[in-house]
Amino acid sequence: MRIPTEIIQSLNEQLNRELYAEYFYMAIAGYFFEKELRGFAHFFLRQSQEEKEHAMRLFNYLVEKGVPFTPLPIEAPSKNYASPLGCFEAAYEYEQRVTLTYYNLLKKVREMGEYDVEEFLWWYIREQREEESLMQSWVDQLKLAGEDAAAILLLDQKAGKGEKD
Ligand code: FEO
């Protein structure tokens, strides 16, 4: 069955949000490399790579459905971040916004009886739960660390080893 144009547009916008997330996390990784916090930098590079995979999953679904690909512009993320905590707060906030966009789309496809798209979207709903939980956990840990440089360095090492992600 063909996907309605309105849903195709929404899926393409989700793809764009995933590509923005890839770029956004790359920008945050750049900030951490500048600060010599290489563990956090590698954490965000891994997240960036995951976001690319999320975009590709959408791309492949659209291709499978015979939808011509329409590229959209990708917004430039900020390169100015106030602190490690500020980076994770920005990432957590973005993930929550993305979750809401998936919820809104899921609601729409249900109302339209687009069950194949609905089934496809559930993967993203579960993924968003994991990503929000991950970012929230780092926000909480960095809040506990506060201004304590030794504690931040310890968290940086932990992030570099892939612990808690
Ligand atoms: Fe793929 Fe973090 O949204």
Image (spheres, grey):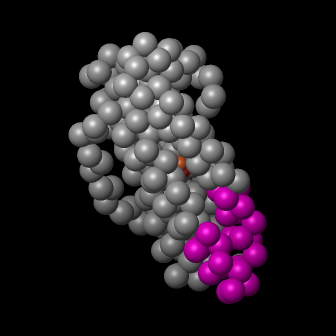
**Range covered by the magenta-colored residues:** 103-125
Indicate whether residue 109 is drawn in magenta: yes
**Residue 143 drawn at (x, y percent):** 47, 34
Q: Looking at the image, is 142 positioned above or below residue 120? A: above
As displayed, is residue 89 above or below residue 163? below
4 and 15: which is toward the camera: 15
In this image, 54 relative to 13: left or right? right
Q: Residue at x 68, y 86 (%)?
A: 112
Whether residue 49 is visible to the viewer of this picture, yes or no, is no
Horizontal side of residue 112 vs 7, given as left or right: right
Q: How many marks?
A: 0
Seen at 50% across and 15% down, the residue is: 154
Q: Quadrant of the C terminus?
A: top right
Residue 57 magenta: no
Residue 41 screen position, x and y as percent:
41, 25
Quadrant assignment, res 11: bottom right
Q: Quadrant of the N terminus?
A: bottom right
Relative to 29, say whether 116 is above or below: below
- Main SS type for the magenta part? helix
Residue at x-position 27% and y-position 50%: 76
Query: Looking at this rendering, what residue extends furthest in the left direction?
Result: 80
Q: Is residue 52 visible?
A: yes
Give x and y (percent) for residue 109. Answer: 66, 79
Q: Is residue 136 above or below residue 154?
A: below
Q: Residue furthest bottom?
A: 112
Residue 116 locus on image (x, y percent)? 74, 71
Q: Identify the image quadrant of residue 83.
A: top left
Q: Is residue 149 left or right of residue 49?
A: left
**Who's the residue at 75% across and 75% down the image?**
115
